[in-house]
Amino acid sequence: MDYAQLFEQLPKGSISEIIVERITNALISGELKPGDKIPTETEFSEKLGVGRNAVREGIKVLVAFGVLEIRRSEGTFVVDDYNDKLLDPLLYGLILSEHSIEELLDVKIALANAIMYMAMKRASDAELDELQRKGEEFRKRMNDPSATDEECYLASMAFNEYLGEITHNRMLNQLDGINRKIAVFTRHKALENSRAAGEPDSLPANYLKEVELLKARDNSVVSEFMDERLAIWQKYLL
């Protein structure tokens, strides 16, 4: 492998950041693939005419992000499978950016649309039955005065995590996983506010309606349903 893209003439800027960008672009273009061994620090240094320390710093960043892994006595390789660390840069970038609850709800609805559509196309009948069971467990928790808010939250998450899984689209589920992490506060708040308002069945009923629509396999209802869900979120969050 000649690594042509990796060793193009360097532009001005931080060498370590350029190394990160070069490796990232090589992955996007397919010049580097999962499991490939990348050039050594010495190769980068000699081919690009830069110090090894700068190269090392760039590689350390991608190791920390979970993109590369160092195998002792073998070298540095592109990871050959997904790991949770890959979500960290995007997650922190979104957390640290300024955004309103309204913007967060827009993102949640956009992803919820995609999740519902793909689950409708790909989930098996047995999987939808299991999703319904999780929805009923959520309803049971929400309507149990002795259940804690945390128990209700966990039941809600169990439903939504499983819904992401049965899209059978790992990338979509990963993106929704980021959304679920960012939205932890709003999910807690919506559950607590609905119970405090004496409306504990509002959210579970909406979850179970989603299951009913998924089982009907009619994607023309997705948009109208999401308008209904957004209205519920707005009621308890804004």
Image (cartoon, grey):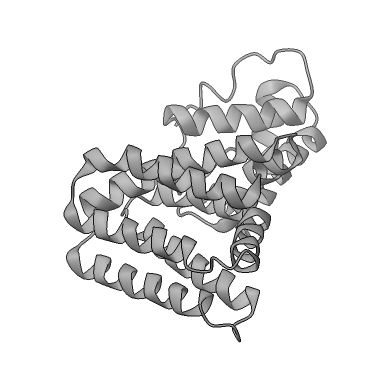
The residue drawn where x is 76% and y is 25% is 15
Quadrant location of residue 136?
bottom left
Q: Is any atom of residue 36 visible in this view?
A: no
Q: Position of residue 173 (x, y in %)?
A: 43, 52
Q: Position of residue 24 (x, y in %)?
A: 57, 32
> Is residue 196 shown left or right of residue 31?
right
Q: Is any atom of residue 50 visible in this view?
A: yes
Q: Position of residue 121 (x, y in %)?
A: 21, 48
172 over 46 or under it: above or below: below
Query: In terms of depth relative to the viewer, which is nearer, 143 or 169?
Result: 143
Q: Position of residue 189 (x, y in %)?
A: 66, 59
Quick one: quadrant of the C terminus?
top right
Query: In terms of depth relative to the viewer, which is nearer, 173 or 25?
Result: 173
Query: In terms of depth relative to the viewer, which is nearer, 98 or 86?
Result: 98
The residue drawn where x is 19% and y is 45% is 218
Residue situated furthest front in the rendering: 198
Give the number of callouts.
0
Quick one: quadrant of the N terminus?
top left
The residue drawn where x is 72% and y is 45% is 60
Residue situated furthest bottom in the rendering: 146
> Is residue 92 shown left or right of residue 146?
right
> Is residue 18 shown left or right of residue 29?
right
The residue drawn where x is 30% and y is 44% is 117
34 over 191 or under it: above or below: above
